[in-house]
Image (cartoon, rainbow, N blue to C red):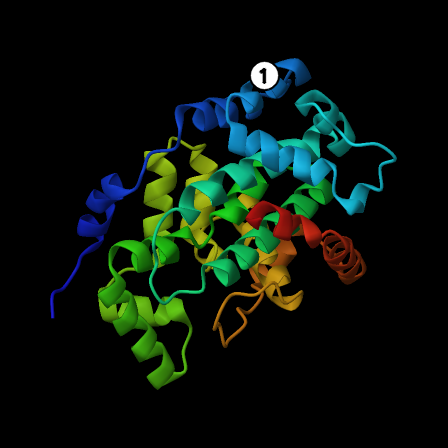
Amino acid sequence: MSEITLQMVVADLDRLPALPEVVQDLMDYLQRPEVDIGQVAYKIARDPALAAKLLRIANSSFYGLQRQVATIRDALTVLGLRAARTLVIGAAVVTHFQALVAVGYDQRAFWLHSAGTALCARALARELGANMENSFTAGLLHDIGRFILVALFPEAHRRVMAYRDEHDCYPIEAEQEILGFNHTQIGAALAVRWKFPAEIAVAIAHHHNPMDIPANSLVDLVHMADVMAHVLEFSGGNEKLVPCLSDAAWDRLGIGWVEFKRLLGEVDAQRDEAGWMLS
């Protein structure tokens, strides 16, 4: 039985297809504090699949429009530029990874939980006045290391899952025991490889252990968003144990129970957005 190391996994990230240039260009542009709707429409139009998905979302029954939206610019207007920015990032990343073959793995359940966490992170960011795009992206990719492990090292993943089932523990504990490293380190390495803002890589790396590092609002936010997604039952596949909410993260974010329950309700009402990113 061959052993793998974190260095081997990180080196094998080169086996993953690179983000299409048009998508990388769009994501870089959307990181700017001020963006031009015409430029966003132009960049989206360069990717036919992304353009078609955005039009499908804008024309969905959720918005109840009296007429069909026919142009990307109109779709951006209907959705609102801030919401469209996060949905475009989500659709681009999910579409990119769905091309990978992960045999015997419930990809839809994985991405539904990822998308749900992204929506919770966006809601928290709006409540706290944080960067909504970075929060959404970090939430979407918080567990991407698991998917990479399944796609590139399926035998190692099977050993991890066998240990988890035998010991009834969290997957991250099984990963650490069997591999000597875990999915958060893989995901952070990918964020660095893709040149995402450093705070996204840090949030991915520490979303399971916010109490172990100095106060970091995005780490705390993604940690809480992950818990919220579990509470709202955004499927995580065969996840048996719900992560515990860190007291340190809770205290540092300063969200009260009334606000927390209100945000859960808001995201629950938006859950169709998660399905749109996967369609």
Amino acid on which disc 1 is placed:
Tyr
Task: Look at the image and tell me whether residue 131 can be seen.
Answer: no
Q: How many marks?
A: 1
Q: Position of residue 169 (x, y in %)?
A: 40, 78
The residue under the point 50% across, 26% down is: 47
Q: Is residue 101 left or right of residue 215?
A: left
Q: Residue furthest right?
A: 66
- Quadrant hosting residue 37: top right
**Dot 1: within a 10 Å radius of its alpha carbon, few (fewer than 14), some, or many (20 or more) residues?**
some
Can residue 251 be seen from the camera position used here? yes
Residue that mark 1 sits on: 42
| Residue 156 pos. (x, y %) | 24, 66
* SS for dot 1: helix
- Residue at (49, 24) in percent of width and height: 28
- Say which residue appears at 71% left-offset and 40% top-offset: 126
Q: Is residue 121 left or right of residue 128?
A: left
Q: Farthest residue in the bottom direction?
A: 166
In this rendering, the answer to whether 135 lies above or below 196 is below
Q: Position of residue 217 (x, y in %)?
A: 57, 44
Q: Is residue 83 above or below residue 206?
A: above
Q: Position of residue 67 (x, y in %)?
A: 84, 32
What residue appears at the point 39 percent right and 65 percent down from the top-left corner?
A: 105
Horizontal side of 167 relative to 263 (left or right) equals left
Dividing the image into 4 quarters, which one contains the N terminus? bottom left
Residue closer to the observer: 171 or 125: 171
